Amino acid sequence: KPFSTIYDHYCLSDRPSKLCVAPTDQWFELSSGLFAVKTHNWIALNKSDALNAVRTQKKYPKFVDVFAPYTKNVNLIQNGYSWEELWFFTALYGPFNKSSPSSNLVYPFKSEQGICGLYAWWEDYLPESPFLSENIPKLTTYHTKGNQMLSLVPYNFLTALKQSKNFHFIRKIRDDEHHGHGVIMANGSTISMYNAILELNIYRSNTSLH
């Protein structure tokens, strides 16, 4: 999607931000019953939350200091955790209090919560069936072992996403055309995601697609 679509979707609307929360055994306990919630690094913030994140970073130029009001163990975060995965939720919403939760997160919980997946339809996302709208091809045959990364993405999948009226997100694509990873074309050849996006941009400039 072009920048204008992304901007309109998140900056000119009141849509909630999208975060993928890790299982609760990966959260950091700041003090008794008080947790820094771990989220995955792919997030989409609406304008309000994005501005709040910037203000919080200016207030705490040293990122780990955002946890200081809640714990004396900031060094443990620096030494044993990916602190940036703990930062956003705490900076935006504060820590999770097990005894009086202020969010709809469940504790304890063994699985991820929120908007998670290699491919997500964020307008109306259902974790058990993420391939929902229009005529977008499924990607189930393109997952690598463990379903952690996409080794190949069909070019017609990208063009279908582009033509879609909905807002989609795809992530974790192995992008090494020399080893058969990236975007597979109709003729069976493989190109990098970078080159595929270049082709999509050229395609867009010659059509009315958005």
Image: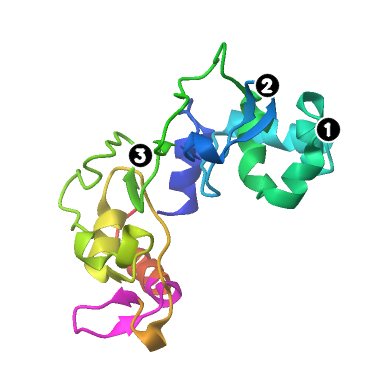
* First in sequence: mark 1 vs mark 3: 1
Q: Residue at x 54, y 15 (%)?
A: 101
Looking at the image, residue 91 sits to the left or right of residue 177; the answer is right
For numbered disc 3, what is the local secondary structure? loop
Residue neighbourhood size for the residue with mark 3, other residues' Cα within 10 Å, grouped as few (<14), some (14–19), many (≥20) = some
The label shown at residue 44 is none
Q: How far is disc 3 from disc 2 in space, using C-alphas?
A: 35 Å
Picture quadrant of residue 88: top right
* First in sequence: mark 1 vs mark 2: 2
For mark 1, what is the residue? 59
**Which marked residue is nearer to the observer: mark 3 or mark 2?**
2
Q: Is residue 35 above or below residue 147?
A: above
The span shown in magenta is 182-196
The label shown at residue 32 is 2
| Viewer-proximal residue among 12 and 17 | 17
For mark 3, what is the residue? 122
Circle 2: residue type: Ser
Residue neighbourhood size for the residue with mark 1, other residues' Cα within 10 Å, grouped as few (<14), some (14–19), many (≥20) = few
Pointers 1 and 3 in contact (C-beta within 8 Å): no
